[in-house]
Amino acid sequence: MKLSDFDFDLPEGLIATRPVRPRPAARLLIVEAEGEGEALRDLHVRDLPDLLGPGDRLVLNDTRVIPARLAGTRERMTGQGTSVARIEATLLEPRPGGRWAALVKPLRKLKEGESIRFSDRLEARVERIAEGQAELSFDLTGPAFDAALAEAGQMPLPPYIAALRAPDARDAEDYQTVFARRSGAVAAPTASLHFDEALLARLAAKGVAFTHVTLHVGAGTFLPVKVEDLTTHRMHAEWGEVSEEAAAAINATRAAGGRVIPVGTTALRLIETAGASGEVRPWRGPTDIFIYPGYRFRVTDGLMTNFHLPKSTLLMLVSALMGKERMARAYAHAIAQGYRFFSYGDASLLLPGRRERLAEGRGRT
């Protein structure tokens, strides 16, 4: 399996820079496996209550995106007086001791031990510089840090959106799910952005069950795959948790013959990690599971997800679930029909046949 096998041409005009409103008005491509073929249907996210019902369980990632993009200044005394440099920082992931790994621009203008002032309430000390990143320790912790960060920071839009426009106040709402609870992500679980409270209520009224898990999505989700041989690729690790209650609920659905359908690749990767033994067990810690064609799914019966970048690990994941050729045809259909791609784009509901889901193969944790 090669990286080039997952390439495709996408017109730039199909990259969504804003979500549709209301959220469930986004388009929804249904991809169903039928033997050697497939069925493709063009619907909308608001149609989900007509597609799901009693026995189905949606697994939702309740991570909360922090406003991780910061702008500040560094002051340094020189022989000519005070030197001031403008600094931009994007928080990547928390580190032990309350520190944060961060991408900083321009990194060359910082030295270890210096401070960056982001606002009157928020300042960070540069503890370490290594491997193109900085490790920052902030002068605030806990709720005080969260409040100061909310005041000073901006939503960390994905690079393919940031290249087309700057983040603004609308993104604080648009780039956050309505069930976000646990702060720590620097990227949104974007398939979940299509839900609003009204749609959740309609699904519940149809008998659909919900389970919340947490995977703090890291900036590594946007890193390109740099190796042609996929078996040598190493995934970035992300912290996640499946509670005892969540594990029991998922196992009960499976035992009753119901469908377990994660919303988003983040929720899928987490429950497959927790279900590596064949039964979902409580899980808390980092996961670097890499799912590509040939992987044997142990928990997942379907997936709701957005449309992904060429040559991305997420495109490999959906190809593992549905089959590479089937997904290639689905993406060709989506492009021809003008579906909107990536984080603020439209969605798909992938429903594999039992043969595809249980096919023996490989995958790495």
Image (tube, rainbow, N blue to C red):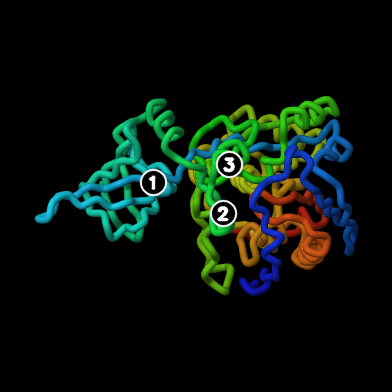
Label 3, label 2: how far apart the Cα atoms are: 11 Å
Give the residue drawn at x 53%, y 51%: 166
Tell me if residue 209 comes above or below residue 329 in the rendering: above
Residue 210's tag is none
Q: In terms of depth relative to the viewer, which is nearer, 4 or 82?
A: 82
Look at the image and tell me whether residue 277 can be seen.
Answer: no
Provide the residue designation for mark 3. Answer: 171
Between the residue at mark 3 and the residue at mark 1, the CA separation in whole angstroms equals 17 Å
- The residue that mark 2 highlights is 165
Which element type, helix, strand or loop, lies under badge 3?
helix
Q: Classify mark 2: helix, strand or loop.
A: loop
Tag 3 near tag 1, CB within 8 Å: no
Quarter of the image with the N terminus in it: bottom right
Image location (x, y in percent) of residue 199: 78, 32
Closer to the camera, 297 or 239? 239
Image side of residue 323 versus residue 177, left or right: right
Residue matched to label 1: 71
Q: State which tag comes first along the sequence, 3 or 2.
A: 2
Residue sitting at x 53%, y 65%: 233
Labels 1 and 2: the sequence-earlier one: 1
| For marks 3 and 1 on the same chain, the one whose residue lies earlier in the sequence | 1
- The amino acid type found where label 1 is placed reads Ala
Question: Is disc 1 in contact with disc 2, using a CB cutoff of under 8 Å?
Answer: no
Instruction: Please tell me in which quadrant of the rendered image residue 34 appears.
Output: bottom right
